[in-house]
Image: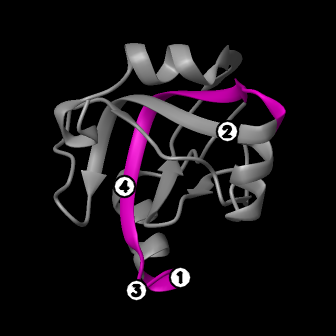
Amino acid sequence: MFGSSLALKEVISLTSSRFPDQSICIVDNWFWIDLEAPAQVIEQMAAQGQRPVMLLAFDVLFSSSGASRPGEWLRTTPLVAFTDNMFFRTRHTLYVLMGPGRRNTAPLSIILRLFSSERDGY
């Protein structure tokens, strides 16, 4: 999978003008994770407009909200929409994927256990 190949400043400008009211986080060194979960969990996610996909990113490049600092890692909440091969939208944040990434499948329970932070409350 490949995200944007534009320069960081160009991506910030493009994304800010296209999504002016959206919190933006630009990431590199990312993994698209297709989640394995019980059918009931998948159904609950779908009822909330979410898909069983999360993003792991090991290099935050920019965050408009300051929720993540450059160089930090993050795990997103579930995917709401993916557009233009680079815009990964969750309920509260638009993540912009930069450069090449990887796609993997993993159980939701493992992702939550391995990639949780104090911000998640775990």
Mark 3 lies on a secondary structure that is: loop
Name the quadrant containing residue 38: top right
Which numbered mark, 3 or 1, is in the foreground of this view?
3
Which numbered mark, 4 or 2, is in the foreground of this view?
2
Mark 4 lies on a secondary structure that is: strand
Could you give the CA–CA distance between mark 3 and mark 1, rounded to whole angstroms?
Answer: 9 Å
Residue at image coords 50%, 53%: 96
Which residue is tagged 3? 21
Assess disc 1: are there few (<14), some (14-19) or many (≥20) residues with their C-alpha within 10 Å of its C-alpha. Answer: few
Which numbered mark, 2 or 3, is in the foreground of this view?
2
Mark positioned earlier in the residue sequence (2 or 1)? 1
Task: Point out the image quarter for the N terminus.
Answer: top right
User: At which x and y percent is residue 65?
Assistant: 22, 65
Q: Which amino acid does label 1 sit on?
A: Arg
Report the disc number at residue 53: 2
Assess disc 2: are there few (<14), some (14-19) or many (≥20) residues with their C-alpha within 10 Å of its C-alpha. Answer: many
Could you give the CA–CA distance between mark 3 and mark 4, rounded to whole angstroms?
Answer: 13 Å
Which residue is tagged 1? 18
Q: Which amino acid does label 3 sit on?
A: Asp
Q: Is 41 on the left or on the right of 66, as rendered?
A: right
Q: What residue type is labelled 4?
A: Cys
Mark positioned earlier in the residue sequence (4 or 2)? 4
